[in-house]
Image (cartoon, rainbow, N blue to C red):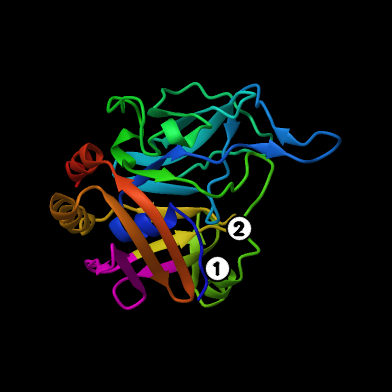
Amino acid sequence: MSSVPNRTLALVLLFFSLGCNITDYPVITDDRGSYSGVIRTGHKAYIQPGRFGQMATVWDDGSDELFSMVYQNQYGDQKLYTFNNYDPTASVIFLDQTYCDWRYDNCLTIMSWNPANDAIDDVFDYDELDFTCSGARSLSILVSYTTRYGECGDAGWRNNQSAMAEFANLATTTWRGKTAYLVPVDSATTSVLLNGQPAPIYGHYSFFITDKLQLVLPMTPNGRHQLTWLQNWIAENGPEAEVTFTYGSLVSNYHVKFHEAGIASNLTRF
């Protein structure tokens, strides 16, 4: 069984309208050249979005692509930022990080303080979420990364054998004039456990992945049933969960905390 420690794709595929904010991230170190140890970033650095690449949720009035940045001082203390790349046309113009540009002018959706000393840190804490800021409607999950996927210019997930095996079996379609993979999600293809309890998957969902391995998630009405079920589950079990997600040969195990106010806000969008 393959274990893929991704905190993003699995829950999006389950609840279909949830974006995430990174509240905890490993200390950034560098062993290249003559220096070895903790580094100071000097400014915000774009965090590579895990093994499954960039993702966008498509609403009736535009699309949201939440992305994260990290600033780290010389001691390893960090500030983690979540911004939204909003496209009012809903054609999903993904954020281009070819040149690793750390500047971003839109409002800050949420920020988390992440000290290097984990003994004094709640891995799910954050500053106030700004519901007036673009992208807040798509944010309902707080995640703690235990693995560095890399900052801008580093890393990637394309060497993952299980993920590539699943790609080989997917049908293709066209997205913005280019080939894209169709990703069928329903109870026959996907299973999710929250604290060992099976989570229902309501109906059928069709996502697609672009030729640049970017995931596009159309928001459909059955997402309301996923969110309503999740609200009820949280009321009985609390907001934190150990999650096991299975899609074919692809398996993920991780620990998350749901943002209840964000879920309630998302429900108003359907």
Location of residue 67 with respect to 75 vertically, above or below:
below
Q: Which residue, given by chain and number where applicable, does mark 2 sit on?
A: 157
Q: Nearer the viewer, residue 84 or 260?
A: 260
Residue 99 lies in the magenta-colored region: no
Residue at 49% x, 36% y: name it.
68
Res. 84 visible in picture: no
Q: In the depicted view, which residue is nearer to us: 249 or 172?
A: 249
Counting residues from the start of the chain, the first of labels 2 and 1 encountered is 2
Q: Is residue 103 visible?
A: yes
The part of the chain drawn in magenta is 183-205
Q: Is residue 231 above or below residue 204?
A: above
Residue 51 image offset from top left, x and y in percent: 55, 56
The x and y percentages for residue 109 are 38, 28
Could you tell me if the residues under marks 2 and 1 are in contact, i.e. CB atoms within 8 Å?
Answer: yes
Task: Describe residue 76's horizontal placement relative to residue 171 as left or right.
Answer: right
Residue to which mark 1 is pinned? 163
Badge 2 crowding class, 10 Å Cα cut-off, few under 14, some 14 to 19, many 20 or more, is some
Count of number-bearing discs: 2
Image position of 11 with respect to 83: above or below:
below
Find the distance from the CA under tag 2 to the CA under tag 1: 9 Å
- Mark 1 lies on a secondary structure that is helix
Residue at image coords 28%, 67%? 196
Residue lying furthest front in this view? 119
Report the amino acid beneath label 2: Trp
Q: Position of residue 258 (x, y in %)?
A: 28, 46
**Farthest-out residue, right:** 34
**Along the horizontal axis of the image, is 179 left or right of 243?**
right
Q: Residue at x 42, y 33 (%)?
A: 121
Q: Secondary structure at mark 2?
A: loop
Q: Nearer the viewer, residue 267 or 150?
A: 150
Foreground of the two, 235 or 203: 235
